[in-house]
Image (cartoon, rainbow, N blue to C red):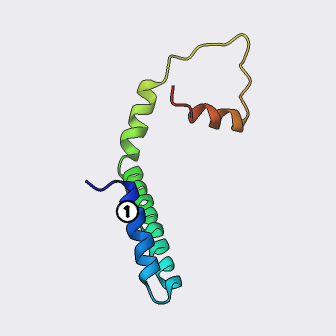
Amino acid sequence: MLGVRPLNVFAVACAALSDPWEQGVILIALAFVGMALFAGFVWGVWAVATRRERQAAAPAEAPAATVDAHPVPERPLWARLRASLRFN
């Protein structure tokens, strides 16, 4: 199975052997951009297709309504983003 390194070597070789080499670099860059756009499109289709299921599951997962004596202040956006990126 090919790993990441041979694919990078193949991409560099393709760009280097192209005449002029700038067109090879553009070709490889467009390939990467195309893969990223395709992945984003597929994610968007998945999000639209499963929206109703996720909305139906959200009320079932919500805890029972309680009255808080001391409301907890919302954390800043940067802190919430950092917490969501932790893998623990």
- Residue 25 position in % (x across, y down): 50, 77
The correct choice, above or below, for 43 with respect to 35 in the image is above
Q: How many marks?
A: 1
* Quadrant assignment, res 81: top right
- Residue 84 position in % (x across, y down): 57, 34
Horizontally, residue 53 falls left or right of residue 37, namely: left
Front residue of 50 and 42 = 42
The correct choice, above or below, for 78 with respect to 68 in the image is below
Structural crowding at the residue carrying mark 1, measured as other residues with C-alpha within 10 Å and reported as few (<14), some (14–19) or many (≥20): few
Which residue is pictured at 72% across the width and 18% down the height? 71
Front residue of 75 and 4 = 4
Horizontally, residue 76 falls left or right of residue 52, namely: right
Q: Amino acid at mark 1?
A: Leu
- What SS does tag 1 mark? helix
Horizontally, residue 69 falls left or right of residue 27, namely: right
The correct choice, above or below, for 48 with respect to 11 in the image is above
Which residue has dot 1 on it? 7
Which residue is pictured at 71% across the width and 10% down the height? 69
